[in-house]
């Protein structure tokens, strides 16, 4: 979220809560408290859901992603290291539980029952976590594609 968006958020909160201002403190203090709280909320949200940007990728990772986006060819052996780094970066944006289930299921090719036994989760929970984690990865990838094009 850009600084202008945060400023607009502050103004909106100030405007919608104007009835809560009682005049016991100076108006500027009241507004600054709303601004500080809004900024802190934004920082907390950013820590929970870090934004993944094209600029965060190394030159090799960006090239690999560009290749994946523009070509239907399989990745050759010389590019496999860059592909692995990109996958690691995308997986790093997931919660630890989501990353674990994707890694076990898709990268290590473990069965649902094996993962269930290793994690102590039911097979239904493993399926749900895998589905949600893949959807998050898809969104991250789509975000990168959209940002790369703009």
Image (cartoon, rainbow, N blue to C red):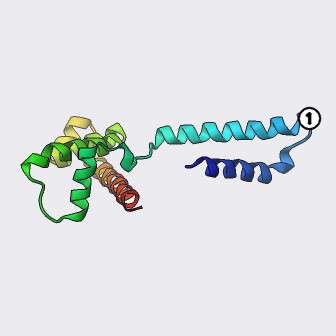
Q: Determine whether, in the image, residue 110 is placed left or right of residue 7.
A: left
> Residue 32, located in which quarter of the rendered image?
top right
Q: Is residue 130 above or below residue 73?
A: above
Would you say residue 9 is visible in this rendering? Answer: yes
Q: Determine whether, in the image, residue 22 is placed left or right of residue 72.
A: right
Q: Determine whether, in the image, residue 16 is placed left or right of residue 145.
A: right
Q: Residue 114: x, y in percent?
A: 16, 42
> Residue 91, located in which quarter of the rendered image?
top left
> Residue 29, located in which quarter of the rendered image?
top right
Provide the residue designation for mark 1. 24
Q: Residue 31: x, y in percent?
A: 79, 41
Quadrant of the snapshot with the C terminus:
bottom left
Q: Name the residue located 38 percent from the left edge and 46 percent from the top edge.
A: 55
Of the pair 140 and 121, the residue shown nearer to us: 140
Q: Determine whether, in the image, residue 65 is placed left or right of residue 5.
A: left
Of the pair 49 and 8, the residue shown nearer to us: 8
Of the pair 71 and 111, the residue shown nearer to us: 71
Please give the count of numbered marks on the rendered protein: 1
Of the pair 113 and 3, the residue shown nearer to us: 3
């Amino acid at each position: 979220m850009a600084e202008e968006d945060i400023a607009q958020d502050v103004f909106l909160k100030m405007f919608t809560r104007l009835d809560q201002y009682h005049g016991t403190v100076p108006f500027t203090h009241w507004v600054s408290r709303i601004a500080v709280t809004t900024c802190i909320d934004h920082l907390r949200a950013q820590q929970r859901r870090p934004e993944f940007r094209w600029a965060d990728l190394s030159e090799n990772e960006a090239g690999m992603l560009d290749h994946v986006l523009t070509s239907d060819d399989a990745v050759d052996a010389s590019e496999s290291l860059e592909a692995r780094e990109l996958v690691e970066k995308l997986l790093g944006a997931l919660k630890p539980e989501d990353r674990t289930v994707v890694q076990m299921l898709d990268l290590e090719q473990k069965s649902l029952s094996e993962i269930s036994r290793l994690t102590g989760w039911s097979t239904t929970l493993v399926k749900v976590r895998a589905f949600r984690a893949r959807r998050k990865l898809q969104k991250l990838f789509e975000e990168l594609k959209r940002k790369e094009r703009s």
